[in-house]
Image: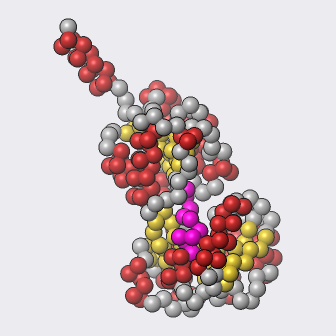
């Protein structure tokens, strides 16, 4: 009888699906690169689903996920996290790679994750290490800007000896007026990931205008550096994967996402464009490039 019971338990375990699922919004590196490190840190099989940015694939994924009924899901990107929060509100979700998650309705008692932007203090300390002569930085603030983050940016600027000038804008069209209000002594422009202000045309304008005025353009994503900005500090993809796996393991051990605060990324990367530096006629000490994680040429 004992052998029979053990055999039945083994069969049930073999037939059970993975306890964890990974849902990617699309094929972009920011959604795919963390997965390998996540799986390694998790230490057990996980089901991986890619929505490829399509509603039909999202619907099919939800059908599959409901059937498999995972104990926790690692969601990469807003589309994946929003779909899960809406369609499977009782399933714990740990998200990553989402700028402005609140704007996408990614919230709830079963949701926590990893911030897609680094702490302002870390950002400015890294920036000051590469550009120690810059002590005047401007930020264009939109109507949806997080006031708590603005306070932390001001505090961080004071800590590293930078004067932070904040100007207001109400829309992408209003950005040009706001840029015209910047004091002459401003040396750098720090763009925040605000979709109410930054559409593609506005970013192109700010890129060209920053070069014309000799402003260093600081951003929060690697893609924006590749598109013409100068400098960013971003979460490290492998670090995000491992950090998310740690959060998932805590959920599997019984912790409720509601008591797990959204975490700042523990590992970061410095991204710098030598091409943008050359166009802006900014000299970069070649020795400093050894401390840059990704150089955009």
Q: In x, y percent, where is residue 238?
A: 39, 58
Q: At 41% across and 73% down in the image, what residue appears?
A: 293
Point out the stretch of residues depicted in magenta: 115-124
Count of labels in the image: 0
Q: Which quadrant does the N terminus fall into?
A: top left
When asked about the image quadrant of residue 218, the answer is: bottom right
Residue furthest to the front in view is: 159
Asked if residue 118 lies in the magenta stretch, the reply is: yes
* Residue occupying image coordinates x 58% and y 89%: 133
Q: Please, is residue 216 above or below residue 111 in the view?
A: below
In the displayed structure, 217 sits above or below 103; it is: below
Residue 200 in the figure: left or right of residue 118: right
Would you say residue 191 is visible in this rendering? no
User: Considering depth in this image, is 77 or 275 the residue closer to the camera?
Assistant: 77
In this rendering, position of residue 78 left or right of residue 21: right
Q: Is residue 99 magenta?
A: no
Indicate the colouring scheme.
secondary structure
Residue 199, relative to residue 32: is it above or below?
A: below
Q: Position of residue 281 (x, y in %)?
A: 56, 91
- Percent x, y for residue 68? 43, 28
Between 207 and 215, which is closer to the camera in this rendering?
Answer: 215
Q: Mark yes or no: residue 152 visible.
A: yes
Position of residue 234 measured from the top left corner of the image (x, y, whole percent): 51, 66
Left or right position of 7 against 32: left
Question: Farthest top residue?
Answer: 1
Q: For the point 41% across and 79% down, which residue is it?
A: 291
Residue visible at 55% across and 56% down in the picture? 115
Query: On the image, which quarter does residue 143 sit in?
Result: bottom right
* Residue 288 vertical position relative to residue 233 in the rendered view, above or below: below
Residue 277 falls left or right of residue 137: left
Q: Quadrant of residue 201?
A: bottom right
């Amino acid at each position: 009888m004992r052998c029979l019971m053990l055999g039945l338990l083994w069969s049930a375990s073999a037939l059970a699906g993975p306890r964890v699922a990974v849902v990617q919004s699309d094929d972009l590196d920011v959604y795919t690169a963390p997965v390998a490190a996540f799986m390694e840190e998790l230490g057990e099989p996980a089901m991986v689903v890619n929505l490829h940015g399509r509603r039909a694939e999202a619907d099919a994924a939800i059908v599959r996920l409901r059937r498999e009924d995972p104990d926790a899901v690692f969601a990469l990107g807003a589309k994946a996290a929003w779909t899960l929060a809406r369609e499977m509100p009782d399933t714990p979700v740990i998200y990553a790679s989402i700028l402005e998650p609140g704007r996408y309705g990614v919230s709830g008692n079963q949701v926590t994750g990893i911030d897609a932007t680094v702490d302002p203090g870390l950002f400015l300390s890294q920036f000051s290490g590469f550009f120690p002569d810059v002590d005047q930085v401007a930020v264009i603030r939109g109507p949806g800007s997080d006031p708590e983050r603005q306070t932390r940016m001001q505090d961080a600027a004071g800590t590293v000896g930078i004067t932070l000038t904040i100007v207001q804008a109400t829309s992408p069209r209003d950005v040009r007026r706001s840029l015209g209000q910047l004091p002459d002594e401003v040396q750098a422009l720090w763009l925040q990931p605000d979709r109410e202000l930054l559409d593609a045309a506005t970013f192109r304008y700010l890129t060209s205008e920053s070069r014309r005025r000799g402003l260093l353009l600081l951003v929060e994503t690697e893609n924006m550096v590749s598109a013409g900005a100068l400098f960013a500090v971003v979460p490290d993809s492998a670090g995000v994967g491992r950090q998310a796996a740690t959060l998932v393991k805590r959920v599997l051990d019984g912790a409720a996402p509601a008591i797990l605060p959204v975490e700042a990324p523990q590992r970061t990367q410095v991204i710098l464009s030598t091409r943008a530096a050359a166009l802006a006629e900014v000299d970069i000490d070649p020795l400093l490039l050894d401390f840059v994680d990704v150089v955009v040429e």
